[in-house]
Amino acid sequence: MKVSLKVWRQKNANAAGEFKTYASPELNPNMSFLEMLDVVNEELSNRGEDPIAFDHDCREGICGTCSLVIDGKPHGPHKGVATCQTYMRSFSNGDQIVIEPWRAKAFPIVKDLVCDRKSFDRIQQAGGFISVRTGSAPDANSIPVPKENADLAMDAAQCIGCGACVAACKNASAMLFVSAKVSHLGLMPQGQPERYKRVKAMVDQMDTEGFGACTVTGSCEAVCPKEISLDFIARMNRDYAVALIQGDPKQVVGGGAG
């Protein structure tokens, strides 16, 4: 099979970008989307042209690095998979495929399809940790945890921090990401001492980074490769309200949690 690629090319953060069209060589329908880009880049390199810059690492749907908008949808046409788990058999011979980077103020473009997602790292650093000592694995495992809480914590912990939720949201909100990171710690006994301090710090950092407010359209859940539930946003908002009540009563809910 062969396809036509309409790819966003941008030399650097300060340069103006534009779409460029490339014809692919003959492709195996069973190769992954990233393998297809590798083949196209090899052709470009052989012609002396600059290869298409794109992020990738594990290529197993674990790291969240493969951040591409494919035909207008983050990660591509399928539900519950990352870009690296999308295969060329998902497309038809002769298709034109439009490929863009994540587009959000808090995710500035570095080059072509690569964007800077260090804003997520800073949100994590603001409160995505615990400071209590848990001892060895047997010590931690000796603490009773209700099964419902354990299951919910594991669901939230599946978030790979890819940023698809931000890319899909009309407001570029990071609420699904932040709520997953807040919830998987807040549901566990070891996360209780900092539960409300954590949510306040992470939501405040999210607002500082310039992410938009959540208007609960559900687009984030729809494109999440790990299918993180919107329920975690509601859980985080409840904890955030408690954090404000426990803190300065003059404070009001910020844009991110409003």
Image (spheres, rainbow, N blue to C red):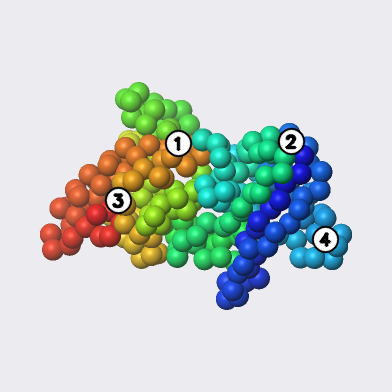
Label 1, label 2: how far apart the Cα atoms are:
26 Å
Label 4, label 2: how far apart the Cα atoms are:
22 Å
Residue beneath disc 2:
29
Residue 174 position in % (x across, y down) = 39, 53
Name the amino acid, label 3. Thr
Q: Residues within 10 Å of mark 1 (few under 14, many from 20)?
A: some
Residue beneath disc 4:
45
Q: Secondary structure at mark 4?
A: helix
Label 2, label 3: how far apart the Cα atoms are:
39 Å
Label 4, label 3: how far apart the Cα atoms are:
44 Å
Extreme residue in the bottom direction: 14
Residue 218 position in % (x across, y down) = 36, 43
Badge 2 or badge 3: first in the primary sequence = 2
Badge 1 or badge 2: first in the primary sequence = 2
Q: Secondary structure at mark 2?
A: loop
Name the amino acid, label 4. Ser
Q: Residues within 10 Å of mark 3 (few under 14, many from 20)?
A: some
Label 1, label 4: how far apart the Cα atoms are:
37 Å
Q: Residue at x 73, y 34 (%)?
A: 30
Picture quarter with the N terminus: top right
Q: Residue at x 38, y 60 (%)?
A: 211
Badge 4 or badge 3: first in the primary sequence = 4
Residue beneath disc 3:
215
Extreme residue in the right direction: 46
Is 116 on the left or on the right of 211, as rendered? Answer: right
